[in-house]
Image (tube, rainbow, N blue to C red):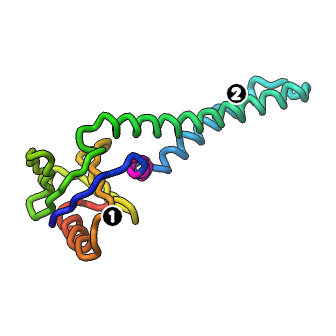
Amino acid sequence: MNITYQLTQNEYLQAVNLHHKKGKRIITLAIYVILATMIVIIGTDFSNTREVITNIIAAFFSISFYMLFVRMLTAYQAKSVYQKSATLPYEITLQIYGKGIKLDKNNNNATIPWSAFMKCKNDEKFYLLYTNPRRFNVIPTRVLSEKQKEEFDAYLKKYIPQS
C-alpha cells in the first residue's frame, strides 16, 4: 500500500496536541494552583481586605500567565520543528507493507521496521506511530481510503501495541 501526502503546519500542530497527554497537563496545572494558593494563604494578612483582594488577583494572573505560556511554548516549538524538518513540510510517499514502513523521498529509501515502533495513538484525524516516548511519525487519515484504513489498522493491531 502506497500513501502520498504533505502535512501542513496546522495539521502538525494538531498532531502535537494529540501527542501531549491532557492528564499530565492537568496535574501540573493543579500543582501550580495549589502552590499559588498556599503562597496567597501564607502571605496574606486576612484582616486587611485590600491585601486579600490584591493577592488573589496576583495569583489569578500568575496562573493565567502560566497557562498561556505553556500553550504558546507548545505552538512555538511545533512550528520550529516543522520548519526545520527535512521531511515534514514536503510531499512524501510511504510504502506500508509487512516488513515495515518505507519512506520514499528523493530516492532515499529508508525503511522503518515494525519492531522500531513502540506504540500507536490515533484519533479521527491522525495516526501517531511512536519510535520512542518523545518521537513520533504522523500519518493523516485524510489520505487513506476506507480499504487502506482497514489494512493499516490490521498492520497496527498485528505489530504495534495500542494505547
Residue drawn at x 65%, y 35% is 63
Q: Is 14 covered by the magenta stretch?
A: yes
Q: Position of residue 122 (x, y in %)?
A: 35, 61
Q: Main secondary structure of the magenta part?
A: helix
Q: Position of residue 134 (x, y in %)?
A: 32, 42
Left or right of 35 in this view: 23 = left
Q: Amino acid at mark 2?
A: Ile
User: Quick one: quadrant of the C terminus?
Assistant: bottom left
Residue drawn at x 29%, y 64% is 143
Q: CA separation, marks 1 and 2? A: 47 Å
Q: Nearer the viewer, residue 162 or 6?
A: 6
Q: Nearer the viewer, residue 12 or 71?
A: 12
Frontmost of labels 1 and 2 is 1
Residue drawn at x 10%, y 64% is 98
Q: Position of residue 39 (x, y in %)?
A: 70, 27
The residue indicated by pointer 2 is 39
Residue range highlighted in magenta:
11-18
Kind of element beneath mark 1: helix
Q: Amino acid at mark 1?
A: Thr
The residue indicated by pointer 1 is 141
Kind of element beneath mark 2: helix
Q: Nearer the viewer, residue 163 or 153?
A: 153
Left or right of 110 in this view: 32 = right
Q: How many marks?
A: 2
Of all residues, the one furthest to the bottom in this rendering is: 147
